[in-house]
Amino acid sequence: VYDNRLLVKGLLQANSTRVFSVATDGKHHVTGHLNGNIQIWHAATLTFTCGLQHGRSPVLGLAVRGDVLISGSKESTAKRWSIALCTCCSTLQHQPHKTVNSVDVDEASIATASDDQTCRLWTHSSDDSIHVLHHAAEVTAVSLASEVVATGCCDNNVRVFAVDSGQLLRTLRGHCCEVLAVYATDGVVVSGACDKTVRVWLMEEEAVAVLEGHSTSVQGVALGPGGGLVTSLSDCEMLTWRAPTFSPAWRACGCHGKCQCPKG
């Protein structure tokens, strides 16, 4: 776990199998595991809070906001949990035998992305999806940003939809292989792909930056508060890029516990 200064704050010792997914909202840290287990930690103290069981298959997607936790699994389902009660509140169903790869949540909506070539939007009060957003291939990533939702797809494209209507607003083209990660906020979309690049897009423009530096597929991306930093994740490596030049500002190698600070 890193703090806002990109210094190591502590280590979460998960009492479970291999970690497949992580999420945080600043109050809780959550880990999803190979055996379907979910573990929740208090962010301030890094103490273990409770454990949940999604099923018996890997938990591939997690999103947390306040008391609400969303998990997505290889078992074709997403689940909505109450952290305070450590209880499953509802199960959200995709097509059978299709993996739920990614999930997100905000105050009004839940988004799930699946190998059934759809992203589905849900409310917090119903098990029935309000919109089914069809894609040309498996949907690998999803990110909610107030009135829009961004998706990453195995057809190499990033798409932006309107949450209220489900209408496709933009298709962002530029990656040359599968998009594995997206993050959307305040008119900006960040994406990472198997082509080892990170792309930064404005909603109304093509990519404004193409960030190169990873040696393997980019599996996670995020944009820091105020848009000043872009963080990207690949196997055992995390890179942080500083806007507006998007030069590499910091590198951490998780498998060896080493980091490199900005040069100059």
Image: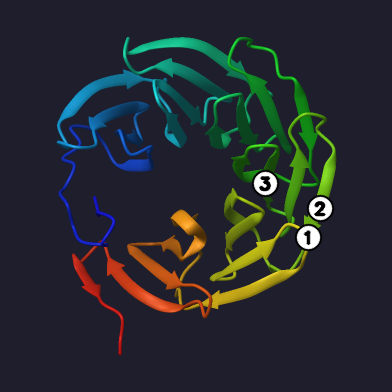
- Which label was assigned to residue 204? 1
Q: Quadrant of residue 27?
A: top left
Lateral position of residue 70 relative to residue 156, left or right:
left
- Frontmost of labels 3 and 2 is 2
The label on residue 37 is none
Q: How far apart are the alpha carbons under marks 1 and 2?
A: 8 Å
Q: Position of residue 61 (x, y in %)?
A: 48, 37
Disc 3 residue type (three-letter)? Thr
Which residue bears the numbered disc 2? Answer: 170
Q: How crowded is mark 3: few (under 14 residues within 10 Å), some or many (20 or more)?
A: many
Residue 246, percent across and down?
Answer: 50, 76
Mark 1 or 2 closer to N-term?
2
Q: Which residue lies furthest to the bottom in this view?
A: 264
Question: What x and y, as percent, mark residue 96?
Answer: 65, 22
Which residue is pictured at 58% across the width and 33% down the height? 99
**Residue depicted at 52% across the width and 11% down the height:** 90
Q: Is residue 1 above or below residue 79?
A: below
